[in-house]
Amino acid sequence: MVQSLADVRKPESPAELAWLEAHWMPFTANRQFKAAPRLFTHAAGAYYTDAQGRKVFDGLSGLWCTGLGHGREEIVQAVSRQIQTLDYAPAFQFGHPLSFELANRIVGHMPAGLDHVMFAGGSGSDAVDTALKIARAYWRVRGQGGKTRLIGRAQGYHGVNFGGISVGGIVGNRKLFGQGIEAAHLADLQPPAGSFFRGAPEEHGVELANSLVSLIKIHDASNIAAVIVEPFAGSAGVIIPPRGYLARLREICTEHDILLIFDEVITGFGRCGAWTGAEAFGVTPDLMTFAKQSTNGTQPLSGCVVKKDVYDTFMAAGAQEYLLELPHGYTYSAHPVACAAGLATFELLERDHAPERVRELAPYFEKAVHGLRGARHVADIRNYGLAAGFTLEPVPGEPARRPFEVAMAMFNKGFYVRYGGATVQLAPPFVSTPAEIDRLIDALGETFNHTD
């Protein structure tokens, strides 16, 4: 059992501890972290360097966002030039050319019909709230203001704003904050322990999607604005929808006049081996959120892409031209420096053929991660593209303990992986080599087998 991080220096004086205390860290066990800090000081390629000078393989691409690797000079130069040229421009009533250029670049990689980009504040959480607000407002503009209910999915993750935690279905992200907005939830897609599916499961997709029909029978379509799902769930432990699931959701939403939103904050721009999860699964939503990989993690940038019909509905609302069609936006919407980073990132994604690279590497990655079937405590393994989740058998009464211990042991060995709930998650950079994947998986298997 991991007792401590012996090779990470602990605070040695009250002053050092106070220095750490000033920052209340997000999604972090602050007491544990500040007793044994894990600090990164540099990054290059697929590796971080920690405060002790150790190289640490980035087994989660930052937080699912640095697939091209760290420190790409083309992005560094683009950001530097932009800060010197136009460091900020007002997001409301005025614009700058880069936001239009980037919007067109993004639309060029969307499924047909997703034609208009509303940039959000920078985080995926902002993108989700933007999509949810557009969905509700759309029905009000259409004269169907009673369509307000939003439907998410059990174990879905849609960020941490109130809209996101309301449609999200991870109880740990909801229980401390009380009542959210009006929402209901589809059945979760977590397969039984021991399924060990490789990619998308073959069966039960239509059956699971039909839980939406049951919700419509309870709430009626006249009260439902939108359904929001991830093409595959990342933060819940890489949970992949069965074949036919997303297509059946599309059919039901179309039949009942309900908008379908894909939250592609994690799946967008390469991770699935396609430009979007929508492309990978062959299903087109009405709205799609994006964030993480859009700037390779270098600048906060996010947004929502909508179908022409949705956009045109607002444009044709009939008010005077000088009035707002949608009273929504953020101070940092389409920030010029973020747009410069986004344009440089898309240039690299295209030049490096990143989605194709992921498709080529994915079978090797799949074979490697499923090679840990039979390792100690491993109850299930799931994968898609360059993402994998391991469910671990829980310590009685402490389901989150063993994944935490595994992640800390991996850090001691020079590998950064994500832990959450009962799972350990991997999402290596698109630029990873087979040898690096082998080292990551070998270290993880060794860690599983030596964890109590």
Image (cartoon, rainbow, N blue to C red):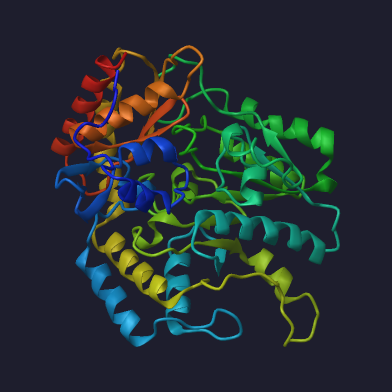
Residue depicted at x 14% and y 47%:
53
How far across and how far down the image is residue 175, in percent?
65, 35
Looking at the image, residue 422 sits to the left or right of residue 57; the answer is right
Task: Give the camera-side residue of 312 and 53.
Answer: 53
Q: Is residue 418 above or below residue 441?
A: below
Vertically, is 104 above or below 301? below
Res 88 → quadrant:
bottom left
Give above or below for 170 relative to 446: below
Determine if residue 381 is in view: no
Measured as percent of width and height from the top left, residue 49 is found at 19, 49
- In the figure, is residue 226 to the left or right of 220? left
Q: Give the image quarter of residue 250.
A: top right
Residue at the (22%, 40%) spot, across then down: 9
Picture coordinates of residue 348, whole percent (x, y)? 27, 63
- Within the image, what quadrant is residue 346 found in? bottom left
Quarter of the image that includes the C terminus: top left
- Residue 368: percent from left, percent from top: 24, 27
Q: Residue pushed farthest front?
A: 14
Q: Nearer the viewer, residue 193 or 90?
A: 90
